Amino acid sequence: EVQLVESGGGLVQPGGSLRLSCAASGFTFSSYWMSWVRQAPGKGLEWVANIKQDGSEKYYVDSVKGRFTISRDNAKNSLYLQMNSLRAEDTAVYYCARDGGRGFINWFDPWGQGTLVTVSS
Amino acid sequence: SSELTQDPAVSVALGQTVRITCQGDSLRSYYASWYQQKPGQAPVLVIYGKNNRPSGIPDRFSGSSSGNTASLTITGAQAEDEADYYCNSRDSSGNSVVFGGGTKLTVL
């Protein structure tokens, strides 16, 4: 069974840092791009970042550039999101998702269950 | 970057057909994918590419596209289809990804 399990969420003060992890199983992790997608409480989905199979390419939404870093460890079948200088507006459920398709098509399947990050004093 | 626009809410009578649309300039170059999200759950992919359904998605779900508009059609909507639906595609740069704001589907 293809599965993604996030961890590392929690309550953090504004300006603080947090590292999210995503453990993948049931597929060849090193063969896929991977993404983080977030959803603020009661709001829609927002793509955050993605990373190429070998980590050589990374892309970010403008609002997190310079603050968040996506990385992966293919030997451990794991994806990470280092979040620094956190702001209240970063409060969201963060989902890890397998990033499928290239060229003219992009899709996310499957998704993890999500981990909640709350930025508040 | 670019934006994808969806109607905030749509309703359909049980057993009838409903179309949910997604508009954006990026859709002139890239295909849309569609996700279903029920309360408290992670999104689930229902349509990707031209009109492809992942394994396990009922064939009442279909996708289409014309110009800058992509559509998700549910033919014979069921009570269990009541959910939020999101579209996504690559943005105009081809490297980043954008989501629509979501459409809340109510099955009457």
Image (tube, coloured by chain):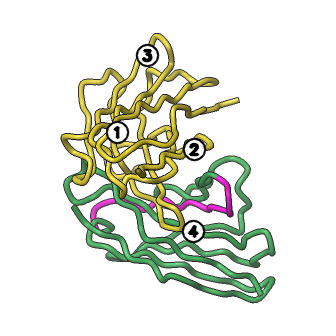
Q: Residue B38: x percent and y percent?
A: 68, 63
Asked if A115 appears above or below B62 in the picture, the reply is above
Indicate the chain coloured yellow by its letter: A
Q: CA distance from mark 2 to mark 1?
A: 16 Å
Quarter holding residue B32: bottom left
Please check whether the numbered discs 2 and 1 fall on a single chain. yes
Q: Nearer the viewer, mark 2 or mark 1?
A: 2
Q: Residue B104 appears at what percent x and percent y? A: 59, 77
- Precedes in sequence: disc 1 or disc 3: 1
Protein chain holding label 2: A
Do circles 4 and 1 both sit on a common chain? no
Q: Which mark is residue A50?
A: 1
Q: Amino acid at mark 4?
A: Tyr
The quadrant of the rendering that contains the N terminus of chain A is top right
Q: Which residues are magenta?
A: B28-41
Residue B85 bears which disc, if any?
4
**Could you tell me which secondary element the residue under label 4 belongs to?**
strand
- Chain under callout 3: A
Label 4 and label 3 in one chain: no
Nearest the eye: A36 or B73:
A36
Mark 2 highlights which residue? A114
Q: Secondary structure at mark 1?
A: strand
Q: Which chain is green?
A: B
According to the image, label 3 marks what residue?
Answer: A74
Label 2 element class: loop
Q: What residue is rendered at 64% in x and 78% in y?
A: B105
Identify residue type, mark 1: Asn
**Gap in angstroms between the C-alphas marked 3 and 2:** 21 Å
Mark 4–mark 2 distance (CA, rounded to whole Å) = 18 Å
The chain letter for the residue carrying disc 4 is B
Query: In terms of sequence position, does the residue under pointer 2 or pointer 1 come before the other?
Result: 1
Residue located 74% across and 86% down the image: B16
